[in-house]
Image (cartoon, grey):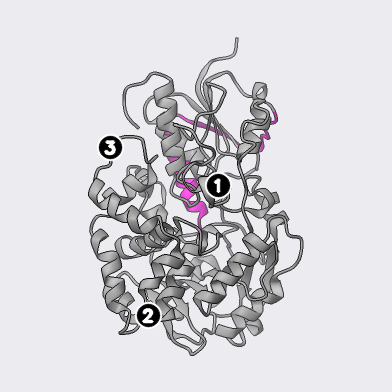
Amino acid sequence: MPTLRDVVVVGAGPNGLTAAVELARRGMSVEVFEARETIGGGARTEELTLPGFRHDPCSAAHPMGIGSPAFSRMPLERYGLRWLHAELPLAHPFPDGSAAVLARSVGETAASLGPRDAGAYRRLVAPYLGRWDSLVGDFLKVPWDGVPRDPVTLARFGLTGLQPIAWVTRRFRDDRARALLSGLAAHVISPTTTPATGAIALVFALAAHERGWPIAQGGSQAISDALAAYLRDLGGIIHTGVEVRRLDELPPARAYVFDTSPSALARIAGLGRAFRGFRHGAAAFKVDYALDGPMPWTASEAWRAGTVHIGPSSGEIATALRAASVRGQAPDRPFLITSQPTLIDPSRAPEGKHVLWVYGHVPAGWDGDLTEAIERQLDRFAPGFRDLVLARAVAGPKELARRNANYVDGDINCGEFRGLQTVFRPRPAWSPYATPHPAVFLCSQASWPGPGVHGMSGHNAAKAVWRRLGMNTPV
């Protein structure tokens, strides 16, 4: 008779691996099944262009990784994870050759916004400085699960954060600050008028000041590899190259935890239309470059930044987001998020060479080619960069979905950030991780708190499993 496991996890992305680690740490027998031949999900590293050029197919910079309450409780450094910081976490260049910056220093950040808005920025972030651990711990757990550790700070944060970023930025007189914060909010690929986008921008800004926006040495795969190595030391087992189509194909277990899209979970577990109200959002269009040298940015600040946002004004950012997520059109001038890891990790490319990671936003499932529009935008702020291109790897929505089945129609956030889904991911429920099947749970970024390589969806799902199985030790 087959041995009964405590938990089987489907999907070896950061959330699936985090859930597995949390449960294995508490003495439970855990097995993980991954459809691809390699683990990692949205945190992988591959040679996408030329030999020796190591690219991250999805996530690159990790402000929420280094600041994650889940990861901070694990000895991941023991398993090879090293965070590397650029001199500046982020630069946001403008057509005149200047740039706003998101620096570790609040003062440097405020000064880059100009004298008319420096004070307003300081006042915006001042109530939360030095309180990252309590704030992010409260923000990333299910809001109604227990009493907040710092309810006053969380309430104050909520008064601002629940506003659309377009409202939050009204306190600034010039567009430099509005563009910088709009770019931060744009990571959830939602219009700037969407409620709670203010919270996204604030969290990213505070993460830069408190923890930085680092990359993982060697690539994002290092995060997944560290989690997997720790899991194996705890007795967990990982199987790769195993595509699960039905629940009865898995070993018998007391609980099954899915790091998948809600639709895949419903199909595999036979739950029919359990997640029929779940909506996927707009998509990414990504290009990875192998370069013959560093990006020739016009703004000097961009040469010192790990991440560079390309959006000349808050209005242009809003237009690009609205085109992709509301109007169903590819923007003529896409807002771009770029990462240049070889500035601080030369091991990612042959000597003297570089890699560049960049994506813009397009409608879900779009089958066009945004490459030319992306390169026109890059050329506005780094003239002549095309002369450095040795090779490029292009991935539209369909290719992104082929690389990672959770990215349905190219939705890298695994769920639209609008309406009830801003809080009730994947559906309104007391426990976002439970399903109609009492032994089946969801732990992907389709569940609260949503996108990002922070493991908190996995951490919170493990807590739900622990409770369901009648255990008393908290996760």
In the displayed structure, would residue 414 be above or below residue 310? above
Q: Secondary structure at mark 3?
A: loop
Residue 452 belongs to magenta span: no
Residue 239 belongs to magenta span: yes
Which of disc 1 and disc 3 is earlier in sequence?
1
Q: Secondary structure at mark 2?
A: loop
Judged left or right of residue 197, residue 109 is left
Q: Looking at numbered disc 2 in the image, what kind of residue is underneath it?
A: Arg
Q: Which residues are magenta?
A: 219-245
Q: Which residue carries the number 2 mark?
A: 173
The residue carrying pointer 2 sits among few (fewer than 14), some (14 to 19) or many (20 or more) residues within 10 Å by Cα, namely: few
State the separation of the CA atoms marked 2 and 3: 38 Å
Q: Looking at numbered disc 3 in the image, what kind of residue is underneath it?
A: Val
Q: Looking at numbered disc 1 in the image, what kind of residue is underneath it?
A: Gly
- Asked whether 98 or 432 is in front, the reply is 432
**Residue at 74% across, 68% down:** 369
State the separation of the CA atoms marked 3 and 1: 33 Å
Q: Position of residue 193 (x, y in %)?
A: 51, 62
Which of disc 3 and disc 2 is earlier in sequence?
3
